[in-house]
Image (cartoon, helix red, strand yellow):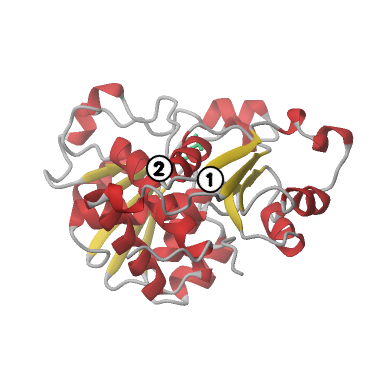
Amino acid sequence: MRSLIDILELTTKELDELIAVAEDIIENPSKYSESCKGKKLATLFFEPSTRTRLSFEAAMYELGGNVLGFSEANSSSAAKGESVADTAKTISCYADIIAMRHPKEGAPLVASMNASIPVINAGDGGHNHPTQTLADLLTIKREKGSLSNYTIGFCGDLKFGRTVHSLIAALSRYENIKVVLISPEELKLPDYIKKDILVKNGIEFVETTDLDKVIGELDILYMTRVQRERFFNEADYIRLKDSYILTPKKMENAKPTLSVMHPLPRVNEISVAIDNDPRAAYFKQVLNGKYMRMALILKLLEVEVK
Ligand code: CP
C-alpha cells in the first residue's frame, strides 16, 4: 500500500505514467466511469479549499466511486482534541483512500503512518502540495508539449508557497529547465530548497525582485498569492501583498508563447483582464487537476483499467 506525501516519492517514470493515464481519461472518459465502483474516498480538510477538495470529489465521482468527509476542522472531532493519528485510524474503518489537507506541516505524513489505507497529502501548511504539482505538470505538458527545455519564472510568495516548493522539486527531474525566482526579499525561496533541489541537481537559477526586467525571457510565468494565513504579523502582509500585479501592460513585454500559470485562488496578483488572453493557462490547470487526481486515485488503489 502506498501513500503520496511528497512529489519526490514518485519516480520520473511514474510521473510520466500518471500524465499518460490522465490524457487517456481526457480522451476516453467512459472507459473509466465505473473503475472505482464500490470504493470510497474520504476528504479530510482541516483548512479551507475550493479546487483541491472539490476536484478530488469530482474525480472520485467520475471514477464511479463515492465520497465522504469534512471541509473544516470545527466540524470534526479535531475540535474536541482528537489527534491526527486517531482520526486516520478511524477513517480507515470507513473509506478506501484519504485526501487530507492540514495547516500543520507533516500532518498528512503522520496520518499515513497510522492509517491502513493510502493517504494523499492535499496540502500541508507551507510545506508541500503534490497533487497541485501533478495538475501543474499536466498543464505544462499540454501547453508546451514537453516537460523539458524551457525557462520558468516563479513570482510572489516563494517562501511559504507550497505549490512552488513541490513544483520546483518535480521539475528537477527534467532536462534543461532554467528557473527565475521573482519575489520580495522577505519572501525568497527557502535556502534549503535552493541547496537541496536547485544546486544539487545543477539547475540554473537567478533571483530578482523585478518582474518587468525578466518577463520577456520566460516561457512560463507561475504567479502565486501572498498568503495572509501564513503571516504572523498583519502589517507585514499589508506591506507585501501588492508586490506583484500582472496586468495587460506588463504582458506587452512577454513572449507571445508565454503560459501564465497560477495554482489559485488569486486575490489581485493577476488582473482579471488577462483571463481572456490566450496565454492564460490557470483555469486549464484547475481542470487538469481533476484528471491527474483521477489518475492518482487509480494508481494508489491499484485499479487497472483496460
Ligand atoms: N490550488 C489550491 O490548492 O486551491 P484550493 O486552496 O482552493 O484547494
In the rendered image, residue 203, in percent from the top left (x then y), is placed at 37, 71
Residue 69 position, x and y percent, is: 65, 37
Residue that appears at 18% across and 59% down: 145
Q: Residue furthest top?
A: 273
Q: Quadrant of the N terminus?
A: bottom right
Residue at the image point whose x is 58% and y is 47% from the top: 40
Which is nearer the eye, 111 or 47? 111
- Element type at mark 1: helix
Other residues around mark 2 within 10 Å, as few (<14) / some (14–19) / many (≥20):
many
Q: Is residue 177 above or below residue 215?
A: below
In the drawing, does residue 100 fall left or right of residue 38? Answer: right
| Spatial separation of the CA atoms under disc 1 and disc 2 | 39 Å
Q: Nearer the viewer, mark 1 or mark 2?
A: 2
Q: Which residue is mark 2?
A: 62
Residue matched to label 1: 187
Is 262 left, or right, of 274 in this rendering? right
Q: Identify the residue at the far left of this view.
A: 256
- Observer able to see residue 225: yes
Measuring 64% from the left and 26% from the top, which residue is drawn there?
235
**Mark 1 nearby-residue class (10 Å; few <14, some 14–19, many ≥20):** some
Q: Earlier in the sequence, mark 1 or mark 2?
A: 2
Q: Where's residue 122, x and y in %?
A: 56, 48
Could one spot residue 219 in this view of the protein?
no
